[in-house]
Image (cartoon, grey):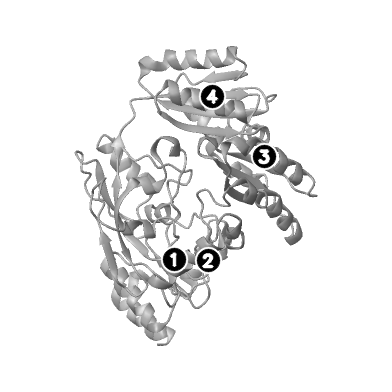
Amino acid sequence: MTHAALLDRLGAIVGPSGLVTGDELRQRSANWTRPAEPCAAFALVRPRSTTETSAVMAACQAAGVAVVPRGGATGLVDGTLCAPDDITLSTERMTQIEPVDPLGMTVVVGTGATLESVQNAATESGLFFPLDLGARGSATVGGAISTNAGGLRVLRYGMMREMVLGLEAVLADGTVVSSMRPLIKNNTGLDLKQLFIGTEGTLGIVTRAVLRLRPAPAGYATALIACPGVDDGARVLRAAQSAFQGRVSSFEGLWPDFYRVMTAPGRATPPLGYDYPFYAIIEIECIPEESERFLGLLEGLMDAGTILDAAIASSEEQRRGMWRIRDRVEHLNADGIERAFDISVPLAKMDGYVRGALERLAAIPGCRAVVYGHIGDNNLHWNTTRLDAAGNAAIDAALYEPLAHLNGSVSAEHGIGLEKRGKLALSRSPEEIAAMRLVKRALDPDNRLNPGKIF
């Protein structure tokens, strides 16, 4: 089938407004990290439903054309990059959010819905959707499912996998696999939905999902603390988890260079001085009457020397101000610290790893680096300057190569895509990778779904 014949077929499925080609398509960027690079696919198709998605996939399969799924295009590992002969399938018109089930605390959504829209729907029903990312206004449910996104509240609520009770996915040949049961417990053989969570659209395109909601938190206790080091920060986290029975929702580590960048003049206001070796934002879900206990916990840790200084948010504006220090990562791009890395390291080994990595990076001419992240769940984010090919390779080696002997991971939550495909063997054994490829061949034997990503 020629490209022209395939476009006629796709247009008949999704309608004229559902097909984007030519100059209109070139006005769309390849992804968030490549804003000046146009989408390279020969067409973008925008189905409205699972039925249309199934028909699109069947038509592309018959034509022998690869399909690259696209959500909000906010990914950081080039998981949505296309070749000129590819079709890219956008979920942007599958934004439906059905009425919230207030008793079962669930909601059924199309995977083109943004995280923020789901959060708002939950809030309007007196409930809470915990997944939260800086790109909440543009990142989609489908993208979060495809990368098993984590974000700021993993400590209390887990990754996206913990929030998906059911889903509907379309395979490469158009087969629909639907398991939309709103059940927390369902041990009936293989849990097929797990095949599509965290696999970056390589096994199927998720079109709908049943999401688990939670009761809205009654309130928060939030503080920015300074500690002698990462290990002391870990002791604070452990003490808070014990004192508040697992209700620590966030524990975000901020190393000094990151703290300085984010609180530079004209940016967030620094609640603490610049002379400390490690900072962290700690947030606990609690009722207002527990604020004194939170204060007492911090004071006791200060007396022990585990905390050197602390600023406690006494209003919602102060709380938001503290989170601006963590969230406004666009300041890093403005300062040219734009290469983003996302890794996991066991907490007990984190301090030594960071110290060693900073030393190795400092030895690379022209390299500037900052580090921060979700320390309580082992997730470090690095941002560095972009150098020439040799310089970038040296940065990659400095950050990735130690992970193999540390039992770390080259990707905590961003996925593999194209960017980290060559690094996968640092975190996965040959047998694991071979098993992944077996699953891929079983579900997509012709390699039509997001080819070249991950494996």
Which callout, 3 or 2, points at the residue further toward the start of the chain?
3
- Label 2 secondary element: loop
For the N terminus, which image quadrant?
bottom left
Residue 61 located left or right of residue 33: left
Q: Position of residue 81 (x, y in %)?
A: 52, 66
Q: Name the one closer to the observer, 28 or 368.
A: 368
**Residue assigned mark 4:** 236
Callout 2 amino acid = Phe
- Label 1 secondary element: loop
Callout 3 amino acid = Val
Which callout, 1 or 3, points at the residue further toward the start of the chain?
1
Q: Position of residue 119 (x, y in %)?
A: 34, 42
Marks 3,2: beta carbons within 8 A: no
Real-space Cα distance between discs 3 and 2? 28 Å
Q: Position of residue 420 (x, y in %)?
A: 58, 59
Label of residue 202 in the image: 1
**Residue assigned mark 2:** 455
Callout 4 amino acid = Val
